[in-house]
Image (cartoon, grey):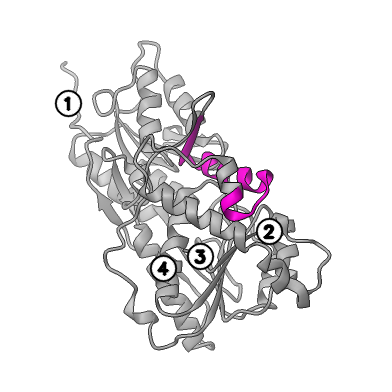
Amino acid sequence: MHDLQADASSFCGDCESECVLYCMGMKTDLARLEAFLEDMARKASPGDRLPTVRSLMSQFSLSQTAVQKVTERLKAEGRISAETGRGTFFVGGVDRVDRSEGPDTAVRGSEGRSFLLLRRSTSIRRGRAVLELLQDKLQAAGHSVVEVSYTDSRDGLRVLRNLPGFDGCILQSSFETISIEMLQAIKLKTSAIVVDGAVLAGTEVDAVGVEWGTSIGRAIANLQSRGHERIGLVTTSHFLLATELGKIRFLELCDGEAGRLLEIPAWPHEKYLELAIERIAASRNADSSLPWTALIVWGVESGLRFREGLAAHGIEIPRDLSVILLGRTDLSNEHANFFEVIGPSVTQQAQSMLDVLLERLGNPGRPYRTTYLAVTSQEGRSVGTCVPPKP
């Protein structure tokens, strides 16, 4: 799947740029293992057994530590589970995206370019799905793609120092602040940079992302059409341009009732889901009723875990609470074949980033801008009709 995938934390920090290809070559066995297990995880049925660490060590000529590092990442992403005394098993291909459309024809005609996919290593499945689609499209068109992951800005700067130049770069920072030093380091490698996320303004890079205000407006209209008036919004308390725009729109439509906001002090790849479930359950009134009949919820990575977590607190969806998720409409791990979801699709995000990158390469002098993704909907069974209480 990958031409090459390298972990920023495992590059030797002292090597000079002329030996970077040797350093990267040392990672090809690790890249092959990651690609092998990623492919197995996508195709696996729940309960399929993972090959043993010993067999993977032998097959890919890697140490036990290197193999365990890859499996720990898959475990953190919720794609495999380990059971003491029994072994390690695949959860199943929960984050598949429809690729039936094939490689985009717009990529063709400019073959032979080199692209860097620079991502912060987190367990966020949306980010992984976007990059996989981008890799498929670029590689199918004959381009060379190198994916490098980094744990934080310090790691990112070290890796960038040792990389060669590229024709273009996709940067996926996954909620981490993008420092001026990081942008300067990338600029030394390429002038065509596209950031995954609407987080930048006034800088010489392009960005593709979401503003959640439009999605929230549509969600409120949807809920109100089904009789819901007491509507709440669950989102992060951390600053993010996309969610801040959503909060503004929500308060505008809800007459400035800040009490309807439930802000969670975490990012989605942290303890966000658990904290959100606890806060919702703890918001019950003295008579055990909830202060809302419906919630709009941002940042849910696993719709199944969210639904089961609320059920464990005696809150059934949609019997006790209707829910619309703000997320990616074509990620099955989010909607779980149950939730109604409003937002862009992963397919649309990958294609938009590719279009912007190719446009920058074709017209280097055009103004830099942020491209906002269109809103789509995924129907579900998580919203019921609100029946007013009898007088």
Identify residue type, mark 4. Asp
- Nearer the observer: mark 2 or 3; the answer is 3
Identify residue type, mark 2. Ala
Q: Is residue 198 above or below residue 64?
A: below
Q: Which residues are magenta?
A: 58-82
How far across and how far down the image is residue 239, in percent?
Answer: 57, 49
Give yes or no for contact between labels 2 and 4 (Cβ–Cβ under 8 Å): no
Q: Secondary structure at mark 2?
A: helix
Q: Which residue is mark 3?
A: 2
- First-in-chain label (1 vs 4): 4
Identify residue type, mark 3. His
- Residue 136 - label: 4
Does residue 72 appear anywhere in the picture?
no
Q: Which residue is mark 2?
A: 8
Residue 63 colored magenta?
A: yes
Q: Residue at x 31, y 49 (%)?
A: 342
Q: Which residue is mark 1?
A: 387
- Residue 94 - label: none
Identify residue type, mark 1. Val
Q: Secondary structure at mark 3?
A: loop
